[in-house]
Image: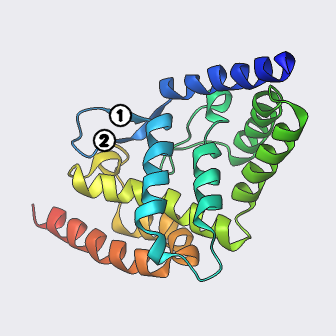
Amino acid sequence: MTERLEQQIAFLNEADKLKHILRGTTLCDASRAENSAEHSWHLTLYALVLADQAGAHVDISRVIKMLILHDLVEIDAGDNPIFGSYDADAMEKAEQIAADRIFGLLPNDLRDDLRATWEEFEAAQSPDAKFAKSLDRFQPPMQNLQSGGGSWTDYNVSEEMVAARVGSKIAIGAPGLWAFAREKIATFFSTQAKD
C-alpha cells in the first residue's frame, strides 16, 4: 500500500511541472502566455460546458479524462505551437519517450490505463477522442479571438492557415463548433484587413 501511494504521489508531483510549460496561446485578456496546466484545465471545462456539441456516442467523462492527461508529455517534450515550425516526427518520438517516463511513475494498473487513454487521444479515432481533439483545437482560436489576435499575430497567421491547420480537426469531432468558429474567424480577419 505504501509503495503504491508513493508512486501515485510521485506522479502527481511530476504533473505539477506542467504549470511551467508555456504555450504559444495567450490568456483571453492577452496579459501573458497560458501554461499547459491551465490549458488542460480549461479544456475540461470546455468539455463540460460544450457537451451538447458532442456526438451521440461520446462519453464526456472519458473526454475529460483525455483532456486532463493529453499534454502531460509536454513536461519533457515541451509545447509545439500549431503555427510554429517543428519537426513532427521528432516531436512524436519525444512525446512517446516522455509518456514512457511520466506514466511509468505510476503503479502498473494506473500506468496502463492512463497511458492507453493518452494513446487513444493521440490516435483520435474513437468518438470520444475525436471530440476531445476538436476541443483541443477549438479553444486556442477562441482565446485568440478574445485577446485581439494572440498567437495569430505572433506567428503572422492568415485566415486560410487557421482553416487548414485547425478547421478540419475541429469539424471532424464537433462540426457545429467549427461552423461557429469559422464565422468568427472570418469576421476577425476581414476586420484586420481593413485596418
How far is mark 1 from mark 2, CA to CA?
A: 6 Å
Residue shown at the point (83%, 38%) measured from the top left? 111
- Location of the C terminus by quadrant is bottom left
Residue shown at the point (42%, 48%) measured from the top left? 42
Instruction: Residue under label 2, please give it.
Output: 27
The answer to whether mark 1 and mark 2 are in CB contact below 8 A is: yes
Q: How crowded is mark 2: few (under 14 residues within 10 Å), some or many (20 or more)?
A: many
Helix, strand or loop under label 1: strand
With respect to residue 107, does 24 lie above or below? below
| Residue at the farthest front position | 1
The quadrant in which residue 188 appears is: bottom left
Which circle marks residue 127 in the picture? none
Most foreground residue, 157 or 184:
184
**Sequence order check: which comes first, mark 1 or mark 2?**
2
| Residue at the farthest left position | 195
Instruction: Residue under label 1, please give it.
Output: 33
Q: Is 168 on the left or on the right of 192, as rendered? A: right
Q: Where is residue 99 in the image (x, y as percent from the top left)?
A: 77, 36
Q: Is 152 on the left or on the right of 42, as rendered? A: left
